[in-house]
Amino acid sequence: MSDIKKCDGYVLHKSRRRMLKGLAAGIGLIALPGRDASALVWEEFFQKHFRELSKDELKGVIARLEKDYSKQYGKQVTVKTTPPIEGVRYGYGLDLSRCIGCRRCVYACVKENNQSRTPQIQWIRVLQLNKEKGIDLSEAEHYYNPATVPEKGHFYMPVQCQQCEKPPCTKVCPVQATWKENDGIVVVDYNWCIGCRYCMAACPYGARHFNWAKPSVPSNEINPNTHYLGNRPRPKGVVEKCTFCIQRTREQPGRYPACEEICPVGARKFGNLLDPESEIRYLIENKRVFIFKEELNTQPKFYYFYAT
Amino acid sequence: MKIMRIARPRLILLCMMSVLILPVGLVSAAKVKEFDRSGQLIVTEKSAADLQVQPAYDIKNRPKEKIFAVPRPPFSEGAFPCSQCHKYMKPNGTRRTLTEYHTEIVLHHAEGQRWCTDCHNLLNRDKLRLVSGELVDFEESYRLCGQCHGDKFRDWKVGVHGKRTGYWNGDKQYLLCVHCHNPHDPKFKALKPLPPPDRPGKAGH
């Protein structure tokens, strides 16, 4: 009796499994787009989290992305995965007594980091504030457009990702697609992001931006020097943010971020917080410094200061 | 023998005491009182070497200023070397309004107290002149500016005043003061801002 039952069960089991297999294959075939694209989509869909990729898997992912981007933009696009440098924690300084609100940094950043032109995404937002009111955000205006800047009675405060030591944005991510690296840079794995925008709601600085549509970057303006966690072309439906130009600053020697390089008044300063000889340490130790929304205890590594 | 035995340790002791006490008596070490950040008094003993007064600032033999690599100064077209014209002219140090040459230069830099040859050397026009009388090249003009703007000079040297590009962990590119500030009219000029961001809901969104 029992043998027959077992046998029956086995037969039943086997046939159900076969049925399910067939069903899965059928649905898979229907769902997948045909020809060459299928392999790419398949690979991309089943790609692991960036930090769980083995060396070989990472190589494969990078090769796939580079091939894809190069084809899309008609030139060789490189995607780096340069890890953090040992003994480095990045810090940024911005001299509010110098900034004139010319927005050169905004557009240098857009260009360097391949941000979407339409719909427009800009990682830096320059606030125009009233000198008499100080840092009062209810007085802030970022659509200002006079013939020349600075305007009388105003000062300017560019805001971008503050690379918090205690980032509220990474805490709320339900899939851990965003995290803080060892050098202090908060990054996003665009292939893991599900686009829920919780992080945007959590960020007190409005530093995160969402790709509501497929980002458009003209082929002749694409910056082919990219980093996986930074300025590589993004898909639709993911969140992006400033990474202190990770593709530049993690090199040895590493260039200054694009916004620092373009600033016509030299208001922007960048360096290693762990190096006592760096300009960022000098300004923290010698100038009047404040961090934005200190009361939230996000502990930004973006230091606003007054040199004069 | 017995006496010797007793005397020897005493002698040694005496020698040791003299070695210990003599230097203390000769060189006066002192206690230094300081307050830490919480306001607590800290008394530390400092040796005489630490307490030695720093020699007064020696204006004649001050350490040489480090030379910073900078790009070519932004001379007006064909203006440098100055001697190409000035060698045919008689040096004239009198303060006057220029009518023939350099009329485009309107001095707006403490003009009440200053005139061309306060900074430009009268006899060798290809050089600038410090207050000390030392002649410096135009490439070293930061030393000239630093005479009055010492705080900015100090910040500039460490890369906090002014624009500095290059590599954050490598070679850095300095700019001269005059690359950003017109030395004859140094106030920074207003700029046209780049366009403001699109407002949400703008057509195309």
Image (tube, rainbow, N blue to C red):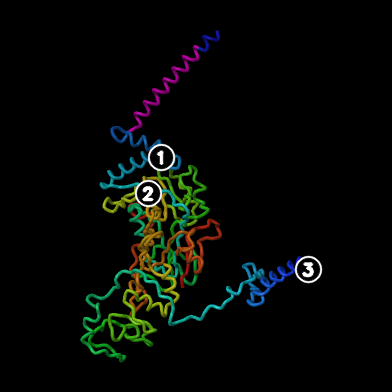
**Is the residue under label 3 in contact with that under label 1 (CB below 8 Å)?**
no
Say whether residue A28 is magenta: yes
Q: Position of residue B190 (x, y in %)?
A: 35, 72
Tell me: residue B201, above or below residue B146: above
Tell me: residue A74, above or below residue B155: above
Q: Mark 2 Cα within 10 Å, few/some/many (few <14, many 20+)? A: many
Q: Mark 3 Cα within 10 Å, few/some/many (few <14, many 20+)? A: few
Q: Position of residue B56 (x, y in %)?
A: 51, 81
Three-letter code, disc 2: His
**Does the magenta stretch mainly form a helix, a strand or a loop?**
helix
Chain identity of mark 2: A
Three-letter code, disc 3: Ile
Q: Position of residue A209 (x, y in %)?
A: 41, 52
Marks 3 and 2, Cα distance to the nearest angstrom? Answer: 89 Å
| Residue located 40% across and 38% down the image | A47
Q: Position of residue A245 (x, y in %)?
A: 39, 55
User: Which span of residues is magenta-colored?
Assistant: A7-32
Q: Which residue is mark 1?
A: A55
Residue B3: image tag: 3
Chain identity of mark 1: A
Say whether residue A294 is magenta: no
User: Which of marks 1 and 2 precedes in the sequence?
Assistant: 1
**Is the residue under label 2 in contact with that under label 3 (CB below 8 Å)?**
no
Q: Nearer the viewer, mark 1 or mark 3?
A: 3
Mark 3 element type:
helix
Along the line of sight, the residue nearer the viewer: A211 or B51:
B51
Mark 1 element type:
helix
